[in-house]
Amino acid sequence: MFALDVIAHCTRVKPILDLVHKIISIDWTVSDCLLPLTSRIYMLLQRLTSVINPPVDVIASCVNCLSVLAARMPGKVWSSLHHTGFLPFASNPLTNMAQCISAEGMKAGNYGNLLVQIEQPRGEYAVTIAFLRLITTLVKGQLGNTQSKGLIPCVLLVLKEMLPTYHKWRYNTYGVRERIGCYTLELIHAILNLSPEGEDQGSTPTLQSLCIYSLANTEAGQAVVNIMAVGVDTIDVVLAAQPSSCGSEGPGQILIQTVKLAFSVTNNVIRLKPPSDAVSPLEQALTQHGGHGSNLVVVLAKYIYHKHDPALPRLAIQLLKRLATVAPMSVYACLGSDAAAIRDAFLARLQSKTEDMRIKVMILEFLTVAVETQPGLIELFLNLEVKDGNEGSKEFLVGEWSCLHVVLDLINSKQQGKYWCPPLLHRAALAFLLALWQDRRDSAISVLRTKDRFWENLTTPLFGTLTPPSDTTEPCVLEACAFVMKIIALEIYYVVSGSLEQSLKDGLQKFSNARRYDYWSQYVKLLVCHVAETEEEGICCFPETQMLISAWRMLLILSTTHADVMHLTEDSTKLKLFMDVLDGTKAALTTPTSVPCLRLGSMMATLLLILLKQWRSVVAAAPDILSPLSLILESTLQADQQMMDRTKAKILSALISVLQIQGLNGGDISQLPQLLLSVCETVKDEALALIDNTRHVSQMGDVQEQEDSMETDSPRGLQKDQRDGVCVLALHLAKELCRTDEDGEYWVLVMRKVPVLPSVLSAVEISLRCKHNLYFTEAALHLLLTLAHTPQGAAAVAGAGVVQTICLPLLSVYESSNGASQSFSRKSQDSACWPGVYRLCMSLMESLLKTLRYNFINEALDFVGVHQERILQCLNAVRTVQSLSCLDEADHTVGFLLQLSSFCKEWQFHLPNLLRDVQINLCYLCQTCTYLLHSKKMLHHYLQSKNGEALPPGPRAQRPPQTLNKDAAAAAGGGGGEREEAELKALLAVQCSLLKILSKTLATLQHFTPDCCQILLDQCMDLAEYRTLFVLSFTTPAFDPDVAPSFGTLLATINVALGMLSEMEKKKEPASQSIASLASLEEIQALKSLLMFTMENCFYVLISQAVRCLKDPTILPRDKQRLKQELSSELSTLLSSLSRHFRRGSPSSPASGILPSIQSKPPTPGSKPSHEGQEPIIQLVQAFVRLVQR
């Protein structure tokens, strides 16, 4: 009875519902007046779906009404409908994809029951069509983002129960099946086009991810593939059979719409699918090779024959383009015997002047992708024929069915602006040409570059005047210009300048003459400024803007190395370009909240840095660069940390370069305090972050140190210690600024305000202990070393506790885990390494002691006491390892000992045993150096046999840099080529190092021997205070460590130095024998001074030690007599050689002023007036000889 009553009511209610539906559809504003009716639909729906035999047509009318309402009020409709039980729902909360796909805990709702129990048996689907429309409307109305969890059960029902099987259902009416398929795909299409904002909800699946996964991995995907496989012939048959009265709702149109949606959905699934190694079932279905033309790729390609709806072939080609990019297959192979026919169809549509422009663009985009990914297919489309040319050389001609005809036609300057060549099509043609150049398709390029007017037509866009960036510019015009710039850049880069086509050279000349460099530089600057000013609106054509700036950057970088070809040689133009880049960088990076600006700023900063390095002369003459760079730095330091690290590093690097090129001359000194403050703040923050990270790494252990850690509690993510990291570059910039501010006027104040030194020293300490952060440690020590050169800097560094910080941790740098000291490396000393850090620490101690003197003596003695084993090992190692790194360490060590030797009494008091050991080892070192310098062949043999292939490369800058002159190069070439030349240079580098070590060793020994004046004149001198350093023997120095250093060693040292001086004077010797042939004039001058300094110190030590022996009562008179005789004869011979040398005009030692005895020595009674013009050293030796002879 109740059922009959309901049915009777429904016949009256349905017309009312249909009327409401019609009214609201036409005029939405009436909906408020109809609220009493529309608000009852929910209750009606709930009741009607729960009766035994529900009235399907009335329910469909209810749902149709709700669909119209949902278009305007999705939230209200959703919340009211949610409580009716009509829609599918989940009884358990959704947590992961597996649970969703299995539909575990999901209920089909009243609609699901209705579909299975009533609609499918009857073959009438009014409610299903209304349901699909309603869900699509809800998804589009923002609920796709906000209520995706609630909608998942509804969408899952469609994906699991409807899409895979709907074509098998029973249907009473023709055309309903196609409509259900179309609406289903419309819903999926809407979901795949949801914006990702607000969609990310952690691990819970979203509507989009659910659709992508289902289509890629379940039967739903196969259903979509089946729709696409309908084929162009079936569609043509349906269209032909369709009566003309159907209009846009006919079965043919619906079928076309369904296939188009299938294309779009598949394309989006492949585009949005998360990357994975495994090939998904959908991709397998798309790319599998079926027999007898059942291949899907062929089916897709044949849609090119469809003429009714231009969007259908366009979407088919778009999907082909996507497959050609991602799928590991050959499209050409899939096309089989149809390939040539399909190519002709493609080209026919491309050439037609009345064809839909978007199809042409899509065909060109497909070919552009094919250049890189489909070699066979692109050869088919290029259709190049080999012309019979000379033997061995291939010449190509463009075939009749080649796509190049169309492309050349499209870039023709006379065609521009015609209706059949809009800017979008022109851009697509240029993109295709760029792909050929980027993929180095030489056959096609060789044909193109020699075509008449090709370069002229290609470069036409660069000579046009674009609308200012503030007005609306068509993005594709910017892209077209970018493509042209990139093609020109690639051509210049790959082709030798002499072989460039004359027409291209003329074009570049014209580009320069027409002041286009200035124009484009100005335009790019305005473009960057425009993006910076209109942060939000300016994003619409951001990719195109970025592309143009990238292309311009490529062209400018190339112009730094190919200036002659590109005719960018005028300094005034270069300066204008450089300042534009600087202004653009400033505009972009002083807008730190905008991500696009930061991207552009980073690109511009790279260009700025390269131009700074390449155009040093231009930058040197530029106006103030420091001020804008300082502003940029401050702005970037405040911006988001993760994004800005690379850019910060570039700006810091640029500032270092500017300071090195310009100093502060170009800038206002008032910039310095603020800049110093910013840099010091950065150094402090980075050092503290580094401390935390290093602790974190050392706690985690070395296992994970190699991997990228996913730990989230480590502060700011684990920093990698990089040579070009922010921390290292900030330290280098701080060093440059402190060097510039020599008086310490500003840095003292800044360092009082910001605790830079304590944080840096703490970071250095933990880095040394863990042996991490090598680059940071090196940079920090360089900063401390720079400070240590000035009195207040040295006081600040010492006051911050530098010795307490580095003294003990430094042990871990050269000690292995078992406590044994590591052997000396034979590697080059150019690369950063921990022994290099030890050498830097030694230099730092030397510098601090030299600057602070007595104020630092206790710390210096602590340091030498802790590292005494390494110091003594190092002095001994020169005998066995002559690599430059080992010699460099010996040089630094002796330099430090030289400073420390000024404080003999303190040293004797605190560390008497060590002092004795050092004195002995220095004497042996003197003997080793003399022997190695004396016997060049032996040294050469040692370098070859011990260092093997690891020959030291040319010496570093701090050593006199050796440059081969023409004679030496010729001689080396004659003597066996580059290998011998390298060996010769290596030998000279080692000789220079040995000479430096020898000179410092003798200067140090001079402090351990009595003062010449005092021992000669003071009769009451306490001789016990000074030990005898050399034994009474006159044999030549041996390489045997058992033979003690003697007076013979010192005489041999003077002989070797004199011999090397004479060798430099000889111009006629074979080049391989002469130092003079391997070095420049300045270097020879420096070497001569070094040799003189060595000789003077050697004479001084010799005289002092000899007088010490003569006055020593414990030495037998017989020995003293022998000493007098030997010295008298040896020194007389040396004096005559020395006098001859000076008469030839050799310079005196610049260091002679530091020997007090030479200057203050009174003329002896027997001296002659002629001595006044002689060198002080000769006068001293002559006086001593006369003393001995008495």
Image (cartoon, rainbow, N blue to C red):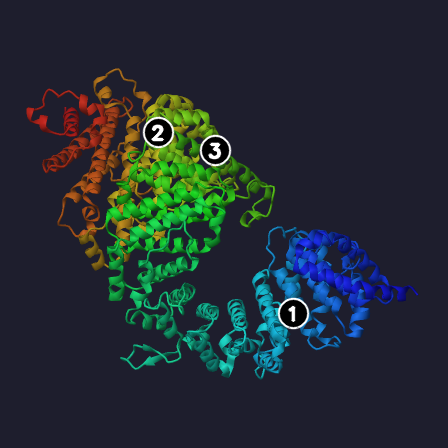
Whichever of labels 3 and 2 marks the residue nearer the N terminus, that label is 2
Whether label 2 touches label 1, CB < 8 Å: no
The Cα atoms of the two marked residues, 3 and 2, are separated by 22 Å
Find the residue positioned furthest to the top. Answer: 1020
**Labelled pair 1, 3 in contact (Cβ < 8 Å):** no
Mark in the foreground, 2 or 1 = 1
Label 3 Cα crowd, 10 Å radius (few <14 / some 14-19 / many 20+): many
Mark 2–mark 1 distance (CA, rounded to whole Å): 71 Å
> Is the C-beta separation of discs 3 and 2 under 8 Å?
no
Sequence-first tag of 2 and 1: 1
Q: Which residue lies under the disc numbered 3?
A: 684
> Label 2: which residue?
670
The spot of residue 864 in percent (x, y) is: 41, 30
Instruction: Give percent across and percent down for residue 448.
Output: 33, 71
Q: Which label is found at residue 789? A: none
Kind of element beneath mark 1 = helix
Q: Quadrant of residue 785?
A: top left
